[in-house]
Amino acid sequence: MTTWYDICAFDDVPALGARTVRIGAREIAVFRTADDAVFALENKCPHKGGPLAEGIVHGRKVACPLHNWVIDLENGEATGADHGCAEEFAVAVEAGRIRLAVPAERLAAE
Ligand code: FES
C-alpha cells in the first residue's frame, strides 16, 4: 500500500534548494527547481552516499556535494560517464502543500 505524506508548504522549499524528510528508515530529499518543478530522491548519492540535498540544483539535476556526480532529478540516474541510481519517489503539489508517496515496502532502508 502506498501512503501519501504531507511534507511541508511548497514555499518552505526554496527555488534551487531542497528539504529533507525522514519517513520510516528513509531520508528523502525534496528538490525544487528554478521553474518550480518538485522532485524527490532518497538523500543518498549512488556513488558513496553523499547527501544530495546539500548539492547544487541546476536545471533538473543536482550535483552531489562530495565528488560532484550529477544526478538527474527526474529518475535518480547518474549522468555522464557515472553509473548508479538514487531511488526516486513520487511527489505532488496540491493546494500549496508538497505531498510525497512512499509505498509501504519501501519504508525500510536498503
Ligand atoms: S558520494 Fe556523491 S559523488 Fe561521491
Image: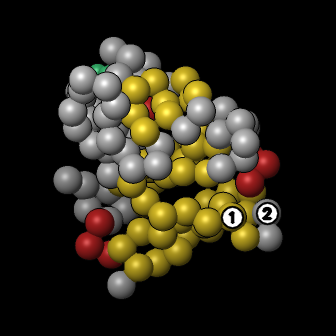
Q: Which residue is label 1 attached to?
A: 93
Residue 94, placed above or below residue 51: below
Residue 26, placed above or below residue 80: below
Quarter where residue 45 is shown:
top left
What's the amino acid at mark 2?
Gly
Question: 32 or 9, which is in the foreground?
Answer: 32
Q: Which residue is drawn at 29% across and 66% down?
A: 106
Quarter where residue 83 is shown:
top left
Callout 2 touching callout 1 (CB < 8 Å): yes
Q: Residue at x 47, y 43 (%)?
A: 73
Residue 64, position as x, y percentages in the image: 41, 24
What's the amino acid at mark 1?
Val
Seen as rendered, the residue at the extreme top is 67
Ligand 1 resides in the quarter of the picture at top left
Task: Please indicate whether residue 86 sits to the left or right of residue 43 in the image.
Answer: left
Residue 81, position as x, y percentages in the image: 24, 23
Disc 2, SS: loop
Seen as rendered, the residue at the extreme bottom is 1
Q: Can residue 74 be seen in this view?
A: yes
Q: Is residue 13 visible?
A: no
Cα separation, mark 2 vs mark 1, equals 6 Å
Q: How crowded is mark 1: few (under 14 residues within 10 Å), some or many (20 or more)?
A: some
Task: Please indicate whether residue 29 sits to the left or right of residue 109 in the image.
Answer: right
Residue 96: which numbered mark, if any? 2
